[in-house]
Amino acid sequence: MDGAILDFGTTGALRNSNLLMYDRQTESWWQEVGGEGVIGHYAGQRLEPLYLSIVSWGDFKAAFPEGRVLSRPNSGRSYGRNPYAGYDRPGGYPFLFNGPDDPRLPAVERVVAMERGDAAWAVSFTTLAEERVVTATVGGEDVVVFWMPGTASALDAGSIAAGRDVGTAGIFSPVGPDGAALTFSAGADGGIADAQTGSGWNIFGRAVSGPLTGTQLEPAPGRIGQLWFSWATYRPDTVVYPATP
């Protein structure tokens, strides 16, 4: 921010049941969703969003066998445990949330959500699980969203590894290595392929078979796995896919 590198801690406070963090350099408070400074020196400023996706360890290890893992040995922390068992189960409601309810989607439905300028857009994991591939134009930017099963919910069971499969998603620019647009669809085998070359793609937006093997799609910043109630409070003007009449 302004050329300075900030590092963060948690304030222990929530706003609309969403984390408020602080930077150790100025002690400004920041909203986790949206990355906006809400109190202090940086009030009104926004952090630059980056691409982030929650994926299973199995998928990560298969795609990046030499990938580095952040670990704190002997920290005493039980990273595999979930203290909020059942938080995101269908029909549930966030017990610390006291804000407006947007009935277009269930409160604890996971969504892929994006904002580009004044435009905001979201698609539910339920829809993605049915369609597997969704394309959209948000604020003039064309994107494609992939969804694949195999990632456990971190909020379902007391042990994260035992959580139900909620899948995961990825957001990418649908442009091939030659600058031409690619069209994607889900195959009967559960994979994702482009219509132009028939290459197969993984959840990281990398071609793993066919003529484009090794090609990496450009990831597009957005929220992947955001719970709907939290996003809808932040951006109530969000257009939800598929658009209703």
Image (tube, rainbow, N blue to C red):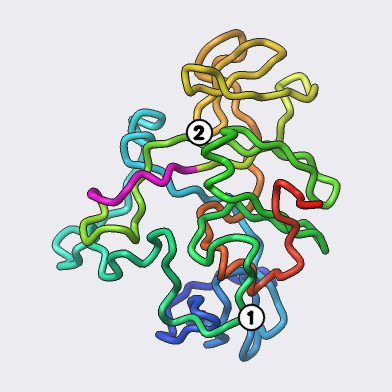
Whether 8 is drawn above or below 225: the answer is below
Whether 88 is drawn above or below 20: the answer is above
Q: Which residue sits furthest bottom?
A: 40
Which of the two marks, 1 or 2, is nearer to us in this view? 2
Q: On the rendered structure, is 217 left or right of 125?
A: right
Callout 1, which amino acid? Gly
- Residue 37's label in the rendered image is 1
> Which residue is located at x 73 percent, y 23 percent?
182
- Who comes first in sequence, dot 1 or dot 2? 1
Callout 2, which amino acid? Ile
Graded by Cα atoms within 10 Å as few (under 14), some (14 to 19) or many (20 or more), the crowding at tag 1 reads many
Question: Is residue 62 within the magenta segment?
Answer: no
Residue 21: in sight, yes or no?
no
Secondary element type, mark 2: loop
Q: Return the residue nearer the eye: 142 or 188.
A: 188
- Residue 218's label in the rendered image is none
Q: Quadrant for the N terminus, please.
A: bottom right
Residue 204 location, x and y as percent?
51, 34
Which region shows up in magenta?
161-168
Whether 210 is drawn above or below 57: the answer is above
> Which residue is located at x 23 percent, y 49 percent?
162
Residue 114 location, x and y as percent?
68, 55
Residue 157 location, x and y as percent?
26, 58
Residue labelled with disc 2: 203
> Which residue is located at x 61 percent, y 8 percent?
211
Residue 173 location, x and y as percent?
70, 36
Q: Are marks 1 and 2 in contact (CB under 8 Å)?
A: no
Whether 166 is drawn above or below 223: the answer is above
Asked which quadrant contains residue 155, the reply is bottom left
Q: Main secondary structure of the magenta part?
A: loop
Q: On the rendered structure, is 234 left or right of 229?
A: right
